[in-house]
Amino acid sequence: MLSDMVLAFAACAACCAPAGVAATACCALGAVEDARRVADKLDIPYYVLNFKEVFEDKVIKDFVQTYASGRTPNPCIRCNQFIKFDALLVKARQLGAEFVGVAVNFS
């Protein structure tokens, strides 16, 4: 039921560096506004969530440590583990959401 849905846009720190953010990046202003327009059209609540600190702590630091130790890091696994299926899920439950749907932009 659409009235039970919540659209949340979660921006990560990896592509949100102030200098040189591509216009097509997942967290570019255009993407945020596109998501807001979809929520408005569907008449559902919309939230922009910033997980920059937990992303830095759990994903970026792990990436650097893993790379420095001579292994090949996979930040997507850590992002799924600590952002999508932890921090985002906790926040969604706090907002009263029953479901969480995520999308990945491979452009």
Image (cartoon, grey):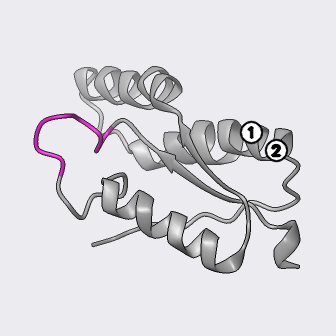
Give percent across and percent down for residue 71.
Answer: 29, 33
For image coordinates 61% across by 42% down, the residue present is 81
Q: Nearer the viewer, residue 21 or 71?
A: 21
**Rendering quarter of residue 106:** bottom left
Name the main secondary structure of what is drawn in magenta.
loop
Range of residues picked out in magenta: 14-21
Circles 1 and 2: CB distance less than 8 Å?
A: yes
Establish if 61 lies above or below 52.
above
Give percent across and percent down for residue 61.
Answer: 38, 21
- Is 67 within the magenta? no
Q: Quadrant of the N terminus?
A: bottom right
Give percent across and percent down for residue 65.
Answer: 33, 20
Tell me how many marks there are: 2
22 horizontally vs 75: left or right: left
Q: Nearer the viewer, residue 33 or 75?
A: 33
For image coordinates 73% across by 67% down, the residue present is 44
For image coordinates 88% across by 49% down, the residue present is 96
- Is 16 within the magenta? yes
Q: Nearer the viewer, residue 105 or 40?
A: 40
Q: Which residue is mark 1?
A: 91
Disc on res. 69 = none
**Rendering quarter of residue 11:** top left
Q: Nearer the viewer, residue 22 or 29?
A: 29
Q: Amino acid at mark 1?
A: Lys
What is the C-alpha distance between the residues marked 1 and 2?
6 Å
Give neighbour class at mark 1: few <14, some 14-19, many 20+ (Cα, 10 Å).
Answer: few
Disc on res. 95 = 2
Give neighbour class at mark 2: few <14, some 14-19, many 20+ (Cα, 10 Å).
Answer: few
In the structure shown, which secondary structural element does the residue marked by tag 1 occupy? helix
Give percent across and percent down for residue 18.
Answer: 20, 34
Q: Amino acid at mark 2?
A: Leu
Q: Quadrant of the C terminus?
A: bottom left
